[in-house]
Image: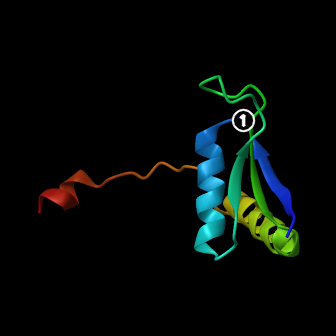
Amino acid sequence: MSWAACWTGATASEAHLVKGYLEQRHVPCVLRSDGPSIYPVPAFGFCVLVPDEWLRVAKASLDGRVRAAGRRRKPARVVALDRARRRA
């Protein structure tokens, strides 16, 4: 079985979030550091790897998540409170 990168990022925390998201959807995945291991923070980033047969499913799931996050953002609005009504 060979593994392919479905996501690449700069920090370990981002990579763990993506890995957790995929694991919740029962997609097998592992993390790989692209940088040298002697440094506390790799200079080249992290990859989330999935088996080749799962690559299309993982990318579709991640792409859907990004599109859904963009749609959910609504502009903030100011709501006036009626203080007289609250006291009653």
In which quadrant of the rendered view does residue 74 lie? Answer: bottom right
Q: Position of residue 51 (x, y in %)?
A: 81, 68
Residue at 68 percent across and 51 percent down: it is 31
Q: Where is residue 22 in the image (x, y as percent from the top left)?
A: 66, 66
Tell me the crowding category of disc 1: few under 14, some 14 to 19, or many 20 or more residues within 10 angstroms, Cα based: some
Secondary structure category for the residue under label 1? loop
Q: Position of residue 3 (x, y in %)?
A: 84, 62
Residue at 67 percent across and 59 percent down: it is 69
Relative to residue 80, is residue 52 depicted above or below? below
The way the protein has been coloured in the rendering is rainbow
Relative to residue 51, is residue 32 depicted above or below? above
Answer left or right for 88 relative to 11: left
Q: Where is residue 76 in the image (x, y as percent from the top left)?
A: 55, 49
Image quadrant holding the N terminus, namely bottom right
In which quadrant of the rendered view does residue 54 lie? Answer: bottom right
Answer left or right for 75 relative to 7: left
Which residue is more in the foreground, 59 or 80?
59
Number of numbered tags placed on the structure image: 1
Q: Which residue lies furthest to the left in this view?
A: 88
Q: Can residue 74 be seen in this view?
A: no
In which quadrant of the rendered view does residue 55 lie? Answer: bottom right
Which residue is more in the foreground, 58 or 40?
40
The residue wearing badge 1 is 10
Residue type, label 1: Ala
Image quadrant holding the C terminus, namely bottom left
Relative to residue 80, is residue 3 depicted above or below? below
Residue at 69 percent across and 73 percent down: it is 27
Residue at 62 percent across and 40 percent down: it is 12
Answer left or right for 3 relative to 68: right
Q: Is residue 46 visible?
A: yes
Which residue is more in the foreground, 65 or 88?
65
